[in-house]
Image (cartoon, rainbow, N blue to C red):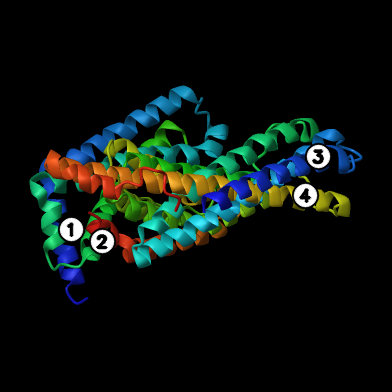
Amino acid sequence: MKKAFAILAVLTALLLIYAFYQAMWVAPTERTMGDVQRIFYYHVPSAWTAFILFFVNLVASVAYLVRKNPKADVVALVSAEVGVIFCTVVLVTGPIWARPVWGIWWTWDLRLTLTLVLWLIYVSYLVLRRFSDSAQTPKLAAVLAIFGALDVPLVYFSIWFFRTQHPQPVIGGGGSIDPRMLHVLLINWLAFSCFAFLVCWARYRLEILRRDVEEAEALESLLETGTSATIAKGKVPLGGGPR
Amino acid sequence: MNSLWPITLASLAKDIRLEWRSKDALNSMLFFSLLVVVIFSFSFDPTAEESREIAGGLVWVAFLFSAIVALNQTWARELRNQVLDAYRVSPAPANALFLSKALGNFILVMLLEAVMAPLFMVFYNLRVLGTAWELIPVCVLGTWALVASGTFFAAMSIRTRMREVMLPLILFPLSIPAIQSMVEATRIILSGDGNPRFWIVLLLTYDVVFTTACLALFETVLQAE
């Protein structure tokens, strides 16, 4: 398991370097926007990765409520944390691109607003987890995740209608994409997905380890000092036993 | 299921009697929203033309903030003397408790709106240019949207450290579509340009979806230990 993690880490690093090379030098320069368009290869893959992670969070939350498996809760926590990070990347790279191209940092466009609201919902999810006491946190967080998922279509419709009433002068239209650009985009997405998976994996192991240590400490404080040492030793994977 | 409504009504009657005798929540909400109205009128120049455009937002933000005052008190009362634990072990359906609390908050916030709406009209020099009766479904559906999910999330936030801070942090992001619907519908009705029907339908959808989810998940939250 530990070997697999190291191999994946190396592969991801190589893939990220290759994707960076592709995005910076191989992909053709966009005719009107110029080089600033290359941020697209970071913006869009981050967005896709973030949305996938939020979806994973929902599935894991439902699984936790149904099965009560603590591992599902760890997956939910990890995917929400990494998802918020990727969503932050989207929200930061977006305005950097929009300023030279649209002439404004931000517009209350459908996709922008939806991403922002999604980010807000998942930050509130993490805040709840942080401020809740350990034993009941998973259940409350899973319930909140389900409410967040129910909220997304409603947010979508509210902004969609709002924006069709008040059209903005600057909307990045769809249009077609050069196949070479699409190719680079997909490579970058693959690299980002691998990277996200790697971070999630590391965070997952860390969280499991943290819970084991917490459990062992609780057990230790319950028992007398003499007997506790042997039990705790058996409980804590001190050698960093890979899971 | 048969015992759902009698228990709901009994619990609701108890809450209303408590509120009637102390008037804690109602008084603090009324004074709070009065303060919000006054501070808003200092922050924005309430001349008739502009105020009609922003009044929808101001009214609902004031009601939202005051509703938080009532929502935070909903469950805090039951923590004293371990009343909530008694509910948990009693055979009464969990949803009866949720419905009674949500209905109690609904009545409180509707009372607040009935008192504060005329005051808003006076302070901001408002006249309804659209169809006035449409404000009634917007008020009813909007208030229910706030209190149903608010009561539910208040039950979640009492399990956390920093209870009073936690509720708006959970409630505000999730109620964005509801708040936008209320504000837009109110703005359209006040200014009389456009049709608020889409927003009322969206508000109704929000109410149906969130009330169903609250009823389905409340037992999980109540029993979470």
Q: Which amino acid is tagged 1?
A: Leu
Looking at the rendered structure, whether the residues under marks 2 and 3 are on a common chain is answered as: no
Q: Are marks 4 and 2 on the same chain?
A: no
Q: Are marks 3 and 4 in contact (CB under 8 Å)?
A: no
Residue B101 lies, in percent from the top left, at 23, 55
- Between label 1 and label 3, give the one nearer the viewer: 3
Q: Are marks 2 and 1 in contact (CB under 8 Å)?
A: yes
**Which of the marked residues, 2 or 1, is nearer the chain's N terminus?**
1
Residue type at the position of mark 2: Leu
Where is A44 relative to B222, above or below? above
Mark 4 belongs to which subunit?
Answer: A
Tell me, yes or no, whether the two marked residues, 1 and 3, touch with CB atoms within 8 Å: no
The answer to whether any part of residue A224 appears in the image is yes
How would you rate the neighbour count of disc 3 (Cα within 10 Å): few for under 14, some for 14-19, many for 20 or more?
Answer: few
* CA gap, disc 2 and disc 3: 59 Å
Same chain for mark 3 and mark 4? The answer is: yes
**Element carrying mark 1:** helix
Residue at 41% from the left image edge and 52% from the top image edge: A74
Mark 4 is on which residue type? Answer: Leu
